[in-house]
Amino acid sequence: MIFRLLAGLLVVTSASLAGDFRVGAARVDITPKDGTPLGGYYRFRGSAGVLDPLFAKTMVMEKDGVHAAIVVLDLSGTVRPIVAEARKLIQQQCGIEGDHVLISGTHTHTGPQQPRGSMMDDITKVNSPAGVSYTSMLPVWIAESVKQAKANLSPVSARVATGRAEGISFNRRILREGQQEAIWQPQKLTPKDRPAGPVDPEVGVLVFEAGDKPVASLLNFAMHPTSVGGGVKISADYPGVFTKLVSERHGADMISIFANGTCGNINHTDYMTGKRRSTLELGTALADAVDAAWPQLKASQAFAPRIRSEQVTLKRRSFTEAQIAKAKDMAANMLTKSFGTVPMAETVCILETLDKQDQPLLAEVQVIALSDDVAVVALPGEIFVELGLALKKASPFKHTFIAELSNGSIGYIPNREAYPQGNYEIVSARGEAGSGEKLIETALKLLGEVKKAP
Ligand SMILES: [Zn+2]
């Protein structure tokens, strides 16, 4: 009798410990109507026509009752109020805790703008009726994609590999001999010029398969999606081509989700030669890199998602009286006249900082570990590649996926060394030097925690 009770107990215990790892994926169309204000540049563009559709793509992961969701939007980024509202709806409708949900944007520059609470809102007219009618629906669509993905949960096995895409991404900050300030996105370089920093050629590939049928993949690469240019036609840019090709080549029913890595200072123009690859060429090169990595995919024993999230308080930058006076002067005419990207970015940043100087500059760092060798890190801004490379190198996980522009955005986040070199990303950075390193330090602390324990 005692033996039979014990045996029964053992069966129950091992069954609950050995629950299946399940994944479900879904996508919801978030293509806007014509006339919707677009993001990506310091001017107003109302959408007119569609080159290719935009999606909210989602994977929900579950084991032993613990859920995590990763949502990536074909949008220029994410903003805190929309993330908060989406998380609230997801909690209500799907029972998944808000801080178990990662919401990111691919950074396409040909998708709708979201309100930032700065002068950008006036410049891009995001609070016009057309803008509000779009952004008010975003949380609903995000929650809908999570609901559908959760409904698709089925037992899967995980496989992971790291591919490489060499020679398609370039550091867009250039140092010239005898010059302190970095040059930003130069037209053509001289032989004496050199990139101010590296690139990250790694292509992260995580695939979930039910039997031998791939149901979802997470793809990771660091490069600005600006290849379509600043037009008014809607496009998901190269991530749209990339994910479509991966699904076509490896599983027609697979939802392929692209999270952009630390591409704050990384573009697709080869500044040495001036060559620019097309959207199709970029997406194809990345899909080819995934093809090359596919035979190297290795099984990874997924456990119940281990999730940590922390709000980091950063210090805002400070400005001289002269800088402030100049910014106010320019702002007075900025809605009717263009002053160029860099001066406008600086002005918007200075005025926002003044406006919010009594509010803390908050940045959420979130990590989701899925196995002993796979973790995803979410960072809220456009992170310089040096920080991403340092994070991957120091991470206790063999495969660390980094999703920038996640769970909100505080704009550009340069590494400490870049600050004295100035120019675009630096003059528009909200946090003082050292902010990026603080986020990486926090991510590493959280990765250390989830490596050890649930
Ligand atoms: Zn950018």
Image: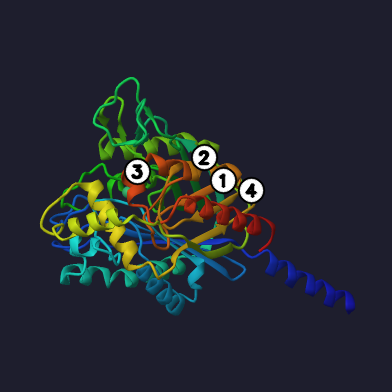
- Of the residues under marks 2 and 4, which one precedes in the sequence? 2
Q: Residue furthest right?
A: 2
Measured from the top left, where is residue 344 in percent x and y? 23, 52
Residue at 17% from the left image edge and 69% from the top image edge? 128
Measured from the top left, where is residue 422 in percent x and y? 36, 42
Residue beneath disc 4: 396
Distance from disc 1 to disc 2, alpha carbons, whole Å, reads 7 Å
- Given residues 214 and 159, the one toward you in this image is 159
Please tell me whether mark 2 or mark 4 is closer to you in this view.
4
Please tell me whether mark 3 or mark 4 is closer to you in this view.
4
- Of the residues under marks 3 and 4, which one precedes in the sequence? 3
Q: Secondary structure beneath disc 2?
A: strand
- Place residue 190 in its image quadrant: top left
Task: Indicate the quadrant containing the C terminus: top left, top right, bottom left or bottom right.
Answer: bottom right
Marking on residue 271:
none
Distance from disc 1 to disc 4, alpha carbons, whole Å, reads 9 Å
